[in-house]
Image: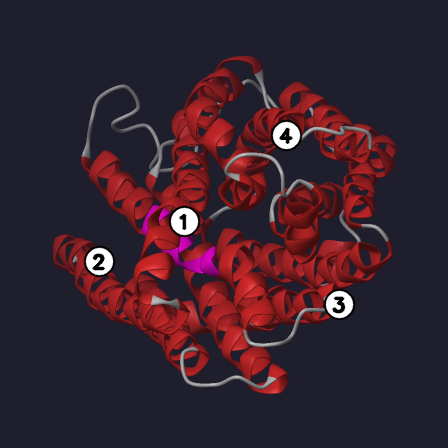
Amino acid sequence: MMELLRDRQALALLLAASLTILSNATISPALPGIEAWFAETPDAALLTRLLVTAPSLTVALFAPFAGMAVDRYGRRPFLLAGVVLFGLSGSAGLMLPDLHMLLASRLLLGLALAMLMTAQAALVGDLFEGAARGRFMGYQMAATNFGGFVFVTFAGWLAGVDVFLVFALYGVGLLYLPFLWRAIPTTRRPRDVRLAGSEEDETGAGPWVLQLAFLVFLAGATFVLFYVVPTQVPFYLARIGHEEPASAGLVVATVPLAAGCAAFAFGALRRRLGPGGTPALGFVVMGAGFLLLSAVASLPAIAAAVALIGGGFGLVLPGFIAGALDAAPAARRGLASGAMTTSIFLGQFASPLAMQPAVEAFGYVDAFRFAALVLAVLAVTVLVGLRLPRERAVRAAG
């Protein structure tokens, strides 16, 4: 880890990735206050929840095109432009007086994320290979989520002062910009990059496309369930008597803290359990967290439940991203990162649309139990689905 911190390029990639944690969950502690402020706006309850996931819709729409553009024109300009747009559109919430305008600024934030995330992931694929790439993804997940713990905790405090102050946190992207400008490398055009074993299937649909599609599906399903925490738990806390924004901030901030701790173990677990066993374990841990969440009411117990959800998530996501970058040929890494980014953010956007009707029809407790059941199914699916390609590769090598 210390070696990475001495590498300016690696540190720049970690800082760029840390902005993604700000995109959605940062405003979560302020949601009840924002809903109360705009109470007279029609459909304020749903629109307020969509503030968390609105960037995800834009990312889902534009990430594939951003990925293709990153492959064609290079990583650096798209990453830097994305950071600038991120800082400006994210902090615009400080000045927008209308809920619909606020929602529009969040959609623009998603465009910034599509540019930033696809370029950043493609750079990771260019600069790291094999086991080093897997280790970096674990460290990136850890650094991003530890930063998220700090930001979301601070956001809870800011929301207690003024619910709109949380949008000021997006200005950190502009603070990062001078260092990113100096440190982000100008790599060769991706079509000129050739790594060992990457020449095959560069233009046609090969086995890597099927593996990528499977990982894209799993990542999207994961985020539909994971984003129950920032979009529903603050309201659940208010429903059972924990109405202070700081309480919601501390509970939600437990998620990235736990995810960061788990991500440190990702590299070692992946070597031991394999590409299927590690996310399967993560899904089981997430499911245990939702079961506990459905059974407790005290703030410490709820924090423990969402910590399990975050810890399991920290074992799931790095493997899917690393697997996508491993599967894709060098000249298609932008496309692969764009597909994964689309899946991740489409899952985030769909989360309140999928879960809010269940919450209204059956209540929070039954909705949390249903999430646990789906995660158990996903654990079996990923264990089987990612083990079979590995076994075929071993037989072919033998």
Residue 109 got which mark? 4
Left or right, 7 with respect to 110, comes to right
Left or right, 385 with respect to 372, comes to left
Name the residue beneath numbered marker 1: 351
| Element assignment for label 1 | helix
- Residue 241, x across and y down, in percent: 61, 76
- Residue 274, x across and y down, in percent: 32, 67
| Element assignment for label 3 | helix
- Tell me: residue 10, above or below residue 204: below
Name the residue beneath numbered marker 3: 246
Principal secondary structure, stretch drawn in magenta? helix
- Tell me: residue 114, above or below residue 296: above
- Residue 258, x across and y down, in percent: 59, 72
Q: Which residue is drawn at 47% across and 27% down?
A: 63
Q: Residues within 10 Å of mark 1 (few under 14, many from 20)?
A: many
Residue 186 makes an appearance in the image: yes
Q: Which residue is drawn at 66% across and 40% down?
A: 38
Name the residue beneath numbered marker 2: 390
**Residues drawn in magenta:** 220-228
Q: Earlier in the sequence, mark 4 or mark 2?
A: 4
- Residue 116, x across and y down, in percent: 62, 31
